Image (tube, rainbow, N blue to C red):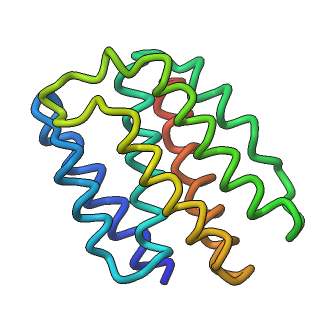
Amino acid sequence: NIAELKKIKKEITQKFDELKGKLNLKYLLREALQSKSPLIFCACLLLILILLVKKITEGVAEIKLISQVIPHTTTNTYVELTLIVFAGMCLGVLAKYVSKVPTTYGNNDLGEYTNYLQTYNQYVSEMDKEEQKSLLGFLKETLDEINIKNKK
């Protein structure tokens, strides 16, 4: 499961890099939605949200700020809440900058992101604690990588 998450993260990050100017989010999201696994869908959506926030804000402040919602030690009670609040904060940042999402990305309609987020929230709440924990681990690792890159 963890290996699958890592593989997907690598694929999406590569696509993001390859497509820099011509990124088509609809394509990435469609791929995420085709995943039969709720865990993989959620991981894809988190990664897309993070990369999108990073790209359109062109800064590190937003990523640093939304990273702070993730507690260093997470008890079972907070895992689900953290995953849901984090995605919601990303959507909030997107709402502010949605006009900056290049139309070449194929998507600057906030309503569509909201629909994906509703699916994400539903999946997260249906996951067992172990799946939620591995998703949170994936999220922490991704943010750590971004924050380390930004320091260089």
- Residue 127, horizontal then vertical, whole percent: 64, 79
Residue occupying the point 39% across, 59% down: 44
- Residue 146, horizontal then vertical, whole percent: 49, 37
Q: How many marks?
A: 0
Residue occupying the point 37% across, 60% down: 9
Question: In the image, 144: left or right of 8?
Answer: right
Q: Is residue 132 above or below residue 53?
A: below
Q: Quadrant of residue 81?
A: bottom right
Q: Is residue 72 above or below residue 60?
A: below
Q: Is residue 24 above or below residue 42?
A: above
Q: Quadrant of residue 53?
A: top left
- Residue 133, horizontal then vertical, whole percent: 70, 71
Front one among 113 and 138: 113
Question: In the image, 22: left or right of 100?
Answer: left
Q: Is residue 33 above or below residue 56?
A: below
- Residue 72, horizontal then vertical, whole percent: 82, 50
Question: In the image, 62: left or right of 36?
Answer: right
Residue occupying the point 51% across, 50% down: 142
Residue occupying the point 24% across, 35% down: 107
Front one among 94 and 48: 94
